[in-house]
Image (tube, grey):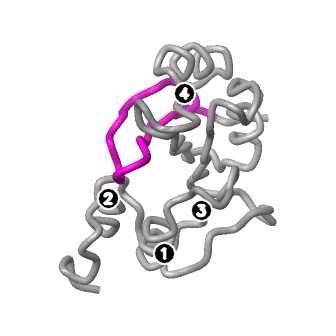
Amino acid sequence: MSSTARPDGAESAVSRLGFKAGQIVQELGWDEDVDNDLRQAIEDAIDGELVEEAMEPVDVVLLWWRDEDGDITDGLVDAVTDLNDTGYVWLLTPKVGREGFVDATDVSEAAVTAGLALTTTVPITGSWTASKLVPPRGPRR
């Protein structure tokens, strides 16, 4: 797909998120408000479908989270369950001023409590911000 194929910028967003062909990406927190163009662009980039229930360890978890979804720490702990040893989480939250906005301080505190490190935060679409969270390196349980 050419970089001009999606005028909404979804392909550019996927490029910034670093998705690659062959990756197994688990999607959690899907709801009617997610950015479907971004989801489709991710599926195009990985040359596969997003999975809801992992049958094997995954490379990336795409976690859509809104303030009303509950305790974000619990959401992050659940998100790392199916990651492989080099996997990471892209946490997508509504941008400032949008319904469901999650304060950056809450994300940062939840990441630490869940044993994750926040490495990058980027505005990814008109409505969503993406934060990359990585577990400590080394074998997990």
Query: Going from the N terminus, do you reach mark 1 or mark 4 first?
Result: 1
Which residue type does callout 1 highlight? Gln
Relative to 88, 32 lies left or right: right
Left/right of residue 68 with respect to residue 123 in the rendered view: right
Q: Nearer the viewer, residue 9 or 16?
A: 9
Q: Can you identify the residue that label 2 sits on?
A: 13
Q: In which image quadrant can residue 37 be found?
A: bottom left
Q: Nearer the viewer, residue 48 or 22?
A: 48
Percent across and percent down for residue 74 are: 77, 28
Instruction: Say which residue label 4 marks.
Output: 102
Tag 3 residue: 25
- What segment is highlighted magenta in the picture? 117-138
Q: Amino acid at mark 3?
A: Val
Q: Is residue 135 magenta?
A: yes
Mark 1 to mark 4 CA distance (whole Å):
24 Å
Q: Residues within 10 Å of mark 3 (few under 14, many from 20)?
A: many
State how far apart marks 3 and 1 are (Cα): 12 Å
Of the image marks 3 and 1, the number of the one nearer the N terminus: 3
Which numbered mark, 2 or 4, is in the foreground of this view? 4
Q: Secondary structure at mark 2?
A: helix
Asked if the residue under mark 1 is in contact with the one under mark 3, i.e. CB atoms within 8 Å, the reply is: no
Dot 2, how many residues are within 10 Å of its Cα: few (below 14), some (14-19), or many (20+)?
some
**Taken as a whole, is the magenta stretch helix, strand or loop?**
strand
| Amino acid found under the numbered disc labelled 2 | Ala
Which quadrant is home to the C terminus? top right
Relative to 108, does residue 4 appear above or below in the rendering?
Answer: below
- Identify the secondary structure beneath mark 3: strand
Q: Position of residue 9 (x, y in %)?
A: 27, 65
According to the picture, the residue beneath numbered tag 1 turns out to be 40
For the point 68% across and 22% down, the residue is: 114
